[in-house]
Image (cartoon, rainbow, N blue to C red):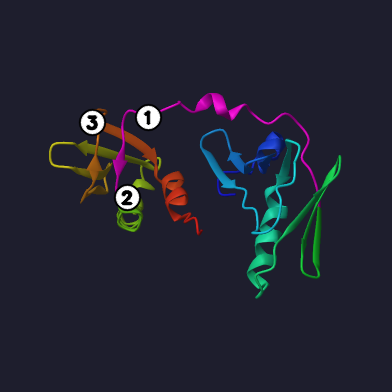
C-alpha cells in the first residue's frame, strides 16, 4: 500500500490492483514513480482438490485495505479472510467482521512492460543495516530534494551512501555488500521512497 498514489486525480492509482490467477494472487501498486508487486502462490489444504478459478482483476482502494489490515491486526485468531466480488464492489469477511468497498474504475497501467525479463546487475545487502544508514543520512537529504547518492565498489564489495547539502554539510556511510556487477558505479534514489520500501518486511 505504501506505493499507492495520494493524488485523487489519478484515482485508479490510489488503489491496489489485484489479479486472481490459478496459481495465486498478485498485488500491484504504483504512484507513477515507484512500483511494488507481491505474488502469493496458491496453497491447497491436504485432502482437498484444487478448484478451478477464472482469471480476473480488480483495483481496491488503499483506504479499504488499511481497514482490512486493522481488522486482521485486531483479530487474535488465525481465521482466513474471505473475499467476495461482484461487478462494482468487493467484500472482506473475517470472523464476524465484514467490510464492503467499491472497486475503482479505470484501466490499470500495463506494469509488466516496465519490468525487464532478467537483471544483469545485483547487490545484496543487509536490509536492517541499510535502512539504519539511510535513515541517519536522510536528515541531510531532506535539505537537498531528498536525493541520496549510492556509490558501488565491486572491487572492495561495499556500497557508500552520501549526501551533500549546501551550507549545511555532508554525510557518508559505507557498508559491506555482495556485488555482482561492474556497473553502474553510481546511482541515486529518492530517500523517502527508499525508506518506505525498506521498511516493508514480508512475513511468510
92 relative position to 197: left or right: right
Q: CA distance from mark 1 to mark 3?
A: 16 Å
Discs 1, 2 touching: Cβ within 8 Å: no
In the structure shown, which secondary structural element does the residue marked by tag 2 occupy?
helix
Dot 3 or dot 2: first in sequence order is 2
Which residue is identified by label 3?
185
**Residue at image coords 70%, 63%:** 80
Crowding at label 3, few (<14), some or many (≥20) Cα neighbours within 10 Å?
A: few
User: Which segment did they paint magenta?
Assistant: 101-125
Dot 1 or dot 3: first in sequence order is 1
Q: Which mark is residue 119?
A: 1
Dot 1 or dot 2: first in sequence order is 1
Residue 192 percent coordinates (x, y): 44, 47
Nearer the observer, 25 or 162 = 25
Residue 122 percent coordinates (x, y): 31, 36
Overall secondary structure of the magenta stretch? loop
Nearer the observer, 153 or 85 = 85
Q: Which mark is residue 140?
A: 2
Amino acid at each position: 500500500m505504501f506505493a499507492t498514489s495520494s493524488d485523487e486525480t489519478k484515482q485508479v492509482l490510489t488503489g491496489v490492483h489485484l489479479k486472481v490467477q490459478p496459481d495465486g494472487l498478485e498485488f500491484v501498486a504504483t504512484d507513477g514513480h515507484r512500483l511494488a508487486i507481491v505474488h502469493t502462490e496458491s496453497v491447497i489444504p491436504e485432502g482437498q482438490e484444487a478448484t478451478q478459478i477464472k482469471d480476473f482483476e480488480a483495483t481496491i482502494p488503499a483506504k479499504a485495505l488499511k481497514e482490512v489490515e486493522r481488522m486482521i491486526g485486531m483479530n487474535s485468531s488465525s481465521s482466513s479472510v474471505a473475499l467476495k466480488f461482484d461487478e462494482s464492489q468487493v467484500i472482506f469477511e473475517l470472523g464476524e467482521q465484514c467490510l464492503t468497498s467499491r472497486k475503482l474504475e479505470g484501466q490499470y497501467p500495463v506494469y509488466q512492460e516496465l519490468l525487464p525479463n532478467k537483471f544483469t546487475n545485483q547487490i545484496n545487502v543487509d536490509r536492517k543495516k541499510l535502512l539504519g544508514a539511510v535513515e541517519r543520512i536522510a536528515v541531510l537529504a531532506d535539505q537537498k530534494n531528498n536525493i541520496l547518492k549510492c556509490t558501488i565498489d565491486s572491487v572492495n564489495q561495499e556500497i557508500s551512501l552520501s549526501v551533500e547539502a549546501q551550507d549545511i554539510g555532508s554525510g557518508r556511510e559505507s557498508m559491506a555488500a555482495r556485488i555482482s556487477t561492474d556497473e553502474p558505479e553510481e546511482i541515486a534514489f529518492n530517500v523517502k521512497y527508499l525508506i518506505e520500501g525498506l521498511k516493508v518486511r514480508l512475513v511468510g
